[in-house]
Image (spheres, grey):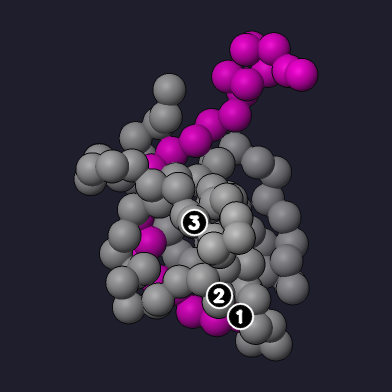
Amino acid sequence: MITIDEFKKVEMKVGQIIKAEPVEGSDKLLLLEVDFGEDKTRTVVSGIAGHVDLESFVGSQKIFVTNLEPRDIMGIESQAMILACKDGQGLALIEANRVLPIGTILS
């Protein structure tokens, strides 16, 4: 169990997928360029390649954890983590039920 104060440390924001492409040498990883309304976009590496249609995925808004320490994945620095859940039917990416301003912080 964690306290509410510990949970409040997790920063979750709406990000818009600007670009998505497979990571060379992996069938599971996608390299994402994501706009969070900051000075520059962030690079995110995620194991969702078999679960999204790239054509409809690019341009969509998803929810990300944005204050994790950057992590090196296959030589690429990932600067956030997309939120998803999985059940017997596959992977579901977390998104708002309507379009929000890019960078909106979840509260």
> Residue drawn at (55%, 77%), measured in percent from left and top?
50
- Sequence order check, earlier mark of 1 and 2: 1
For mark 1, give the secondary structure. loop
The disc label shown at residue 92, or none: 3
Looking at the picture, which amino acid does disc 2 mark? Ala
For mark 3, give the secondary structure. strand
- Give the x, y percent position of residue 77: 66, 62
Looking at the picture, which amino acid does disc 1 mark? Val
> Residue drawn at (28%, 42%), measured in percent from left and top?
97
Inspect the magenta stretch and tell me whether residue 18 lies in it: yes
> Residue drawn at (23%, 43%), measured in percent from left and top?
98
The disc label shown at residue 38, or none: none
Instruction: Give the class, few, some or many, for how many residues have Cα within 10 Å of label 3's Cα (few <14, many ≥20).
Output: some
Q: Is residue 58 above or below residue 40?
A: below
In whole angstroms, how far apart are the C-alphas of marks 3 and 1?
21 Å
Q: Quadrant of residue 14?
A: top left
Quarter holding the C terminus? top left
- Sequence order check, earlier mark of 3 and 1: 1
Q: Quadrant of residue 8?
A: top right
Magenta region, residue range: 1-23
**Which residue in the structure is indicated by mark 2?**
49
Q: Quadrant of residue 86?
A: bottom right
For mark 2, give the secondary structure. helix
Looking at the picture, which amino acid does disc 3 mark? Ala
Inspect the magenta stretch and tell me whether residue 76 lies in it: no
The disc label shown at residue 23, or none: 1
Q: Is residue 91 visible in the rendered structure shown here? A: yes
